Image: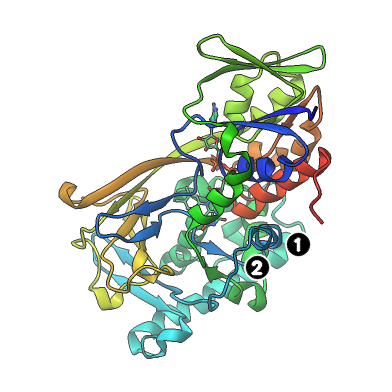
Amino acid sequence: MPQKIAIIGGGVAGLTTGYLLSDSYDVTLFEKDNRLGGNVYTLDTKTGEAIDITVFFYSPMQYPNFFKLLLKLGIKSTTRPMEGCSQSFQNLKTKQAYYLNCDPMRITSTLHPRNFRALFYQGIVFWNYYKGMRMNNEGKFHGLILKEALRFLPGLKGDVLKMAIFPICIMTSMLWDELMEAPAEFVFNKIEKQCGSIKKFVSWRLYPCKTRTYVEKLAAPIREKIILNANIKSVSRFNGDVIVKMADEKEQTFDKVIFACPADTALKLLEQPTDEEKRLLGAWKYKDGLVIVHTDKSSYPSENLWGLYSYLYTEEDGKINTSINAHYRFQKGVPRNSNYIGTQHPNIDIDKNSIEFQKVFRTPIYDINSTETIKALPSLNAQMGTYFCGSYFGYGLHEDAVTSAINVSKMLGADWD
Ligand SMILES: Cc1cc2nc3c(=O)[nH]c(=O)nc-3n(C[C@H](O)[C@H](O)[C@H](O)COP(=O)(O)OP(=O)(O)OC[C@H]3O[C@@H](n4cnc5c(N)ncnc54)[C@H](O)[C@@H]3O)c2cc1C
C-alpha cells in the first residue's frame, strides 16, 4: 500500500509536488478555491480571447527547473526573446510621459526620436543597476533597506528612479513604498538574478502557451483526488500520523502533509507549531493585490504608443503610487488588436461597464523580517511528517515555487534528474 500524502494548496508549487509524487504515493490535494492554479490564471474573455492575466514572462536561463518541468509535460517554447518588450511611463497629473521600446521586432518605434530620451534614461538605469549589484556584492548594502541604499546611487533620481523601480514593482508584485522598505540586498540580488548580464536580460521571453495548459497537465495524474472548495480547520501531528481536520469536524489521517499554501496560512492551520515554525513562517506577511481586466482606454496614451506595460503614476508630497497596466495584445496568442488591459493596483477611474474580470491575488511581502528566513525555511521540512513549499522559498517567482516543490518531492523519494 503506498503511503498517503496530503497537499494543501493547488498553486504551481502544490501541483508540482502532486505531479512528481503521484507515482509513488496516494496523493490527495486540498484547494480552498473553486479552481486550481492559485496565482496563475488564464481568462476566457467575452470576445473569445484566452489571456494570461498573471504569469506570462519566463526565462529559460533563470527558470531552469520550471523549463525542465515544461519539457517533462511535453510543452515546447518557441518564442523570440524580448518580443513586445516596450513600456510607457506616464504622470497622471502632468501627463508627462516616456515611451521605451527595446523591441527588435518594432524597429521603427525603437528608432523613433520620442524613444531616445527614454533609451538614454534606461542606459542610466542599467548603469546604476550594475553599480548597485557591484556594491551589493561587496557587502555595502548589508543591513540597509532600499531607501537607504539609494543614497549610494545618486544617478537614480526623478524620472530615472521611477524607470528603475517600476519594473521591480512588477517583478515583486510590491508597491513603491513597500519596495523602499525592502532589504537592499534582496532587491539587488533579484536584479542580478534576473537581468545581471546581457545574456540574462535578453533571455526573457513571453510565455509560449496559456498557463492553464501546464496547470491541467500537472493536475492530470491526481485529478480523481483533488478536493476543491476545501475548508480545512486544522492540521495536527500525532504518533507519526498527520491529521487533517475539516471545518465540518471530519478528519482524514495521512502519513505526510505538504503545505503548498501561503506561509501565514500554514502557520494558522498547524496545531501546536514548533518555535522554529512560529519564527520562520510567522515572519511572512501577505498583501491582497487587485487585478482588474477591462477595456477602458481613457487613461492611456494613444494606442500606437502602447507597450507591453504602462505605468500610470501619481506623485504627491514625495509619495509615488503607480498602477501597472498590461496591454495583453502583446502577449503571445492574443490578437494584436485586442483592447483588453489588466490593471494591477488600480489608481485610475475605470468605467464599470468596461470591466470584465477582477480578482485579488495574495502575494508575499519581502521585508527585513521575511527575507531573513529564506535560507532557513528548508530546515522545517521532514519534521514530524510535515513539509513546506511555495514561491516564498525564493524570490516569489514560478521558478522559486517549482524549485521548492521539487526539493520537497526529492526528499520524499521522487525522481527528478
Ligand atoms: C499579477 C501577478 C503577476 C505575476 N507574474 C509573474 C510572472 O510573470 N512570472 C513569475 O514567475 N511569477 C509571477 N507571479 C508570481 C506567481 O504568483 C508565482 O510565481 C507562483 O504562481 C506562486 O505559486 P505558489 O504555488 O507558491 O502560490 P499560489 O499560487 O499562491 O498558490 C497557493 C494556493 O494555496 C491555496 N490555499 C490558500 N489557503 C489554503 C487553505 N487554507 N487550504 C487549501 N488551499 C489553500 C490558494 O488558494 C492557492 O491556490 C505573478 C503574481 C501575480 C499576482
Please, what secondary structure does the residue beneath circle 2 have? Answer: loop
Picture quadrant where residue 360 is located: top left
Image coords of residue 313 (percent x, y): 33, 57
Q: Tell me the quadrant of the picture where the N terminus can be found.
A: top right
Image coords of residue 46 (percent x, y): 25, 54
Q: Amino acid at mark 2?
A: Pro
Q: Is residue 179 above or below residue 364?
A: below
The residue that label 1 is drawn on is: 137
Q: Is residue 381 above or below residue 111?
A: above
The residue that label 2 is drawn on is: 60
Q: Which residue lies at the image location 36% right of the left edge and 68% below the top edge?
A: 334
Between the C-alphas of marks 2 and 1, the distance is 24 Å
Whether pointer 2 and pointer 1 mark residues with C-beta atoms closer than 8 Å, the reply is no
Image coords of residue 305 (percent x, y): 29, 76
Q: Earlier in the sequence, mark 2 or mark 1?
A: 2
Total labels: the figure holds 2
Mark 2 nearby-residue class (10 Å; few <14, some 14–19, many ≥20) = some
Work out which residue is located at the far top of the displayed protein and give it: 249
Of the two numbered discs 2 and 1 in the rendering, the one whose residue sits closer to the viewer: 2
- Can the viewer see residue 293 in this picture? yes
Mark 1 nearby-residue class (10 Å; few <14, some 14–19, many ≥20) = some
